[in-house]
Amino acid sequence: MQLKELTVRDIQDIVNMASARDAIDRPEEYTLGEAIDPTAWSSWSLATGKLVARIDELSPEAVAELMAVAWLGRGDSGDDFNALVAHAHSNLRDASKYLAAKSPLHTYLRDGAKKIGVAV
């Protein structure tokens, strides 16, 4: 299994950004009438926005590979990296938002990278 467009540096950057974002307490859902802490929401949202922007910098091929690495790390999508990349190509719409929405994205990427022999 070989990465064609996605670099180890890309994976490391995204792992670090996702890990930092997940260290911020995500505000819980609230019920109507409750006070909202805008600082908590803005910090988490800003970190998520930066994560989305970093993923959006990647080429479509690199995004497909990133999705495949995350799916490998999640462990419930099979272990054929090339098949996962091919499947990811048909699911690239809003891929950056899809990936950023994964709370343990940093864990998925680390575990997936390890499965393809890449140390991050």
Image (cartoon, rainbow, N blue to C red):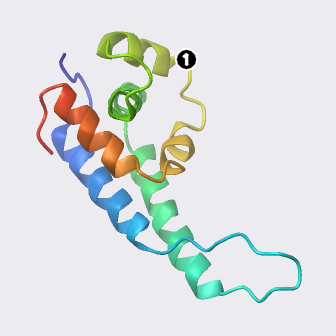
The reply, left or right, for residue 119 in relation to residue 30 is left
Q: Amino acid at mark 1?
A: Ser
Quadrant position of the C terminus in the picture: top left
Quarter occupied by residue 90: top right
Pick the front one: 66 or 73? 73
Rendered residue at 54%/50% (across/down): 101
Tell me if mark 1 has few (under 14), some (14-19) or many (20+) residues whose alpha carbon lies within 10 angstroms of its own. Answer: few
- Percent position of residue 50, x then y: 45, 62
Rendered location of residue 7, percent (x, y): 20, 36
- Residue 28 % position (x, y): 65, 72
Q: Is residue 117 left or right of residue 53?
A: left
Camera-side residue of 88 and 35: 35
Instruction: Decide: is 12 above or below 2.
Output: below
| The residue positioned farthest toward the right in the image shown | 32
Residue at disc 1, secondary structure: loop
Q: Using the image, determine if residue 109 lies above or below residue 34.
A: above
Compared with 71, 15 (above or below) is below
Count of picture labels: 1
Which of 89 and 16 lies nearest the eye of the viewer? 16
Residue drawn at 30 percent across, 41 percent down: 109
Query: Which residue bears the numbered disc 1?
Result: 90
- Toward which corner of the image does residue 79 lie, by quadrant? top left
Residue at the spot x=12%, y=28% of the render? 117
Q: Quadrant of the N terminus?
A: top left
- For the view shown, which residue lies furthest in the front direction? 76
Instruction: Please name the residue shown 65% across and 87% down the image.
Output: 37
Determine whether 103 is above or below 8 in the image: below
Image quarter for residue 40?
Answer: bottom right
